[in-house]
Amino acid sequence: MAFLTSPRRALREVFPYQPGKSIASVQRELGLKNVVKLASNENPLGSAPKALAAYRKAEKSCALYPEGASPELRAALARFHKLEPESVIVGNGSDEIIRLLCEAFVEPEDEVVVSQHAFIRFKQQSVMMGARVIEVPMTDWTHDLALMAQAASSRTKLVFVANPNNPTGTYNTQDEVSALLAAVPKTALVVLDEAYFQYAQAVPGYPKSLPELVREHENLVVLRTFSKAYGLAGLRVGYGVGDPELVGWLDRIRMPFNVSLPAQLACVSALKDAAFVRRSVALNEKERAAVGRALGEMGFGVGESTTNFVFARSPVPGRELFKALVRQGVIVRPLDEYGLPHHVRISVGTAAQNKTLIQALARILAVPA
Ligand SMILES: Cc1ncc(COP(=O)(O)O)c(C=O)c1O
């Protein structure tokens, strides 16, 4: 029987997101026992211990539905950022907030401005709503916010800025972000996605978005996540912070119980685990420098990164390198879907994981480790 119901026209342009290859799939396919995944920018130290303790306690309440609006987590985040709870929306990963923003604000033919090698979910989600996506070239692998401001018009609904950006690892300064906010029409919402905030916050000129910039600009929404520095990617919790009216629109259209009860409770406690975040950031700085040096010596072109991953031009095509590494039990991320077939993105692991990576690369490229 033929399937005759036509999906929305916009969906013809939509391709599913390709997540990093999983450890389980490599174990299944190649029969390998030890597999190192450096493909999804997860925390190699695991999860914040305080979050895990709260998660375990939550098992007593799993028979009950969670509170839909995550009120305790919302209140905890509001205190954490010195804003009111009405300014915060919690999502099933910050990815859900990206989706809600597009669903709430983008009509077919509205414009969305992104930069050329920005985090791909911005474009995918906008296309899903039938938007015209304007892709602005980068300068030195960094979002060119001045050019993005020029591209924004009265037809623009959203301007997406991942800061720092995935996959290029680069960041924009407070001055650049402020200039963008001053230049775009007030009808365009600027989305500042700070998924890697904890790794970047100490770099010179990094924006003070929460609470300062959000208080000053009604057309700014800031996204953060528990997936990276807090080590809770599997729980799927992220959040958006912005004007209460904007948050109200997102709240109206989110799934009724979008964040599970254990996830809500774990994240309230994660916010108290500053020590774990500090440890994660310190390990990342040390290891990112070491991986960068080793890659450089093996002929990679390594970019500056203010994240927990390294963006590098590979001496061999990225997909070939990816495949060869998988055979050695190491998963990295090729970047063909970003239009970067010669680049790879490699998450920073523990010292032992990074050593496994470097040794595998040395074998593949026939160079000393
Ligand atoms: C820039 C950026 N934004 C958002 C996300 C989504 O994170 P999550 O949905 O896990 O909060 C990611 C994940 O890699 C990312 O790199």
Image: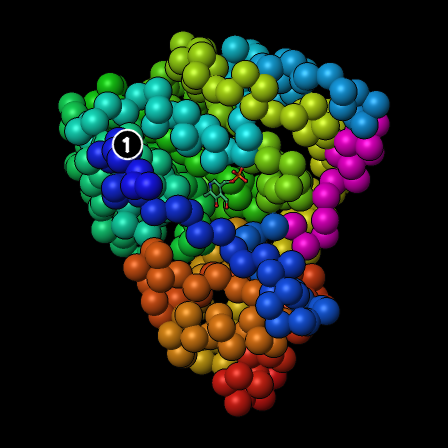
- Residue 106: image quadrant is top left
Q: What is the x, y in percent for residue 339?
A: 30, 59
Q: Which residue is mark 1?
A: 5
Q: Is residue 306 visible?
A: no
Say which residue appears at 59% left-offset and 32% top-offset: 237
> Looking at the image, which residue sits at the far front?
1
Residue 213 lies left or right of residue 24; in this view the side is left
Say which residue appears at 65% left-offset and 14% top-offset: 67
Which segment is the magenta one?
43-57
Residue 272, placed above or below residue 162 = above
Say which residue appears at 72% left-offset and 52% top-offset: 45
Whether residue 204 is in magenta: the answer is: no
- Residue 264: image quadrant is top right
Q: How is the image coloured?
A: rainbow
Instruction: Say which of 49 and 197 sits in front.
Output: 49
Whether residue 47 is in magenta: the answer is: yes
Q: What is the x, y in percent for residue 43?
A: 65, 50
Q: Secondary structure at mark 1?
A: loop
Pointer 1: residues within 10 angstroms few (<14), some, or many (20+)?
few
Residue 134, placed above or below residue 58 = below
